[in-house]
Image: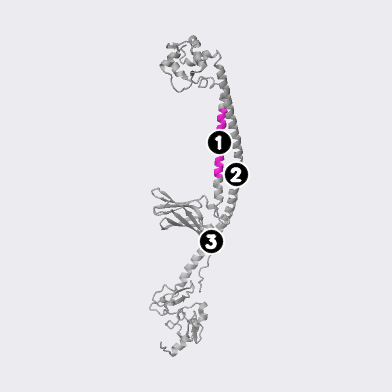
Amino acid sequence: MRLHVITAAFLWAAFVDSRKIRGISSSYKRFYRERKSFLCIDGSRMIPFEQVNDDYCDCADGSDEPGTSACPRGRFYCTNLGFRPHYIPSSRVNDGICADCCDASDEYNSHVRCQNTCWNLGQKERAYVEGQMKTLDEGLRLKQQLIEEGVLLWREKQAQLRELQRAAEDLQIKLEEQRRRKHEADRLKEQTLKGLEARNKGFRHQNSTISHLFQLLDSNKDGSISVDEIKAKVVLVHDEKRVLSEDEALTLLGGGPQMGLSKFENTLWDVLIRGNNYKIKDAYSAPGGLMSEDPHLKAAERAAEWEATDLKKVEEAYETVNMEISDLQKKLEIDYGTDWEYLYLNGQCYKLKVYEYMYTLCPFNTVSQKSTSGTEVSLGTWGMWAGPPKNHYSQMVYENGEPCWEGGSRTTTVTLTCGTETALRLVKEPSKCQYIMDFETPVACQPVLKQRGVHSEL
């Protein structure tokens, strides 16, 4: 059992005002009011009051030694007038280190003489908080502007979508009409061509064609048809691509090397008109032939070409408008905040160089990393908001970037912080292929900041 050496001086110290007891906060002074006994704060034990701060640990919770280092679980309260109060482990009391309490109250019986630095620290703290509050005020002012711009921009996007949808409806009607017109032009061209072919068949039976066909065969216009001219102009009905042989050409010329108009009229013309085995190649449709020169066919062909060109233009316009509608709908489906305050970030990109890499963040789109060698790597595409319930819009997640060599794909988490500018401030890779970014923007500013300098006693 411990022997208590009680002197008159010690008895007097036990009855001093409770405010002199070291290491306790004002909210805990009610436990240390002077009385004959002291109840440990955890209620585990009752001890004589004179054993409080006697440098011997009586209470399991260390509450009897708030001002000494006797209890391993004890805590010493630094009042730190002019700065922020806080607790330190009781083991640091009188340990000769001045950095624990800025008011030096923990070194009351130390071999070192510590200075009270709370006022200077408080000044720096107050200047920092004042700067933060100015930043917050300016950020909130800018945020309100961006909210107003976001609402207007959202309305503009909605109006743009409606205009595109109306344009698509008009183009669809025009597309159907253009398809009908092209079909009609193709039908007219086919009808004209069939009519000319019918005329061509009748033409074969007209004597007036003898001289014309002879002229078609007489390429050099020397008044006679040669073997070479027959090979160049006459083909088999059932094998138009094969060139006639020398013997076949001589046979058609009656065995001679040449044939004049009178002999042609009595022999070869009849063979060509019957068209059973031989015919003149492209006699009616080739350039210079009757069909190719027909003005009605030319007009029908030009009309069909024009309608085909116009149809292609309408189809391309219709496809372009539908792509714009799809892109705009995807953008409008994104959650841009309760007041569309983050909408202004869409379509923007922000860069930050870290060592040999250039990082690019395009909000609601992509994140990438580009090396000085020019190699660009995807660090993810827009995924979702991932902030806590009380601040849902404080974090972005970008997923499914390029695969890592160890497996899995790159992902990036972007934390949004309050500031007066919109800029990418920090990029780190805390683990392989897992990136984090700090992105400053006024729209991340919240109306209420947690007050600094308030210490919870419990």
Tell me where residue 104 appears, x and y as whole percent: 43, 76
Q: Amino acid at mark 2?
A: Gln
* Residue found at x 56% / y 51%: 333
State the residue in front, 128 or 451: 451
State the residue in front, 428 or 103: 428
Circle 3: is it few (<14), some (14-19), or many (20+) Cα within 10 Å? few
Q: Does residue 433 show up?
A: yes
- Please report the bounds of the magenta region as a residue range: 302-324
Indicate the secondary structure of the residue bearing disc 3: helix
Spatial CA span between label 3 and label 1: 50 Å
Indicate the secondary structure of the residue bearing disc 2: helix
Q: Does residue 361 show up?
A: no
Tell me where residue 131 appears, x and y as whole percent: 50, 63
In the displayed structure, would residue 429 be above or below residue 193?
Answer: below
Circle 1: is it few (<14), some (14-19), or many (20+) Cα within 10 Å? few
Tell me where residue 219 appears, x and y as whole percent: 46, 16
Indicate the secondary structure of the residue bearing disc 1: helix
Where is mark 2, residue-wise?
165
Q: Is residue 307 magenta?
A: yes
Where is mark 1, residue-wise?
313
In the displayed structure, would residue 303 be above or below residue 108?
Answer: above
Q: Earlier in the sequence, mark 3 or mark 2?
A: 2
Q: Is residue 382 magenta?
A: no
Q: Earlier in the sequence, mark 3 or mark 1?
A: 1
Q: Earlier in the sequence, mark 2 or mark 1?
A: 2
Spatial CA span between label 2 and label 1: 18 Å
The answer to whether marks 2 and 1 mark residues whose Cβ atoms lie closer than 8 Å is: no
In the displayed structure, would residue 159 be above or below residue 1?
Answer: above
Q: Which mark is residue 391?
A: 3
Quadrant containing the N terminus is bottom left
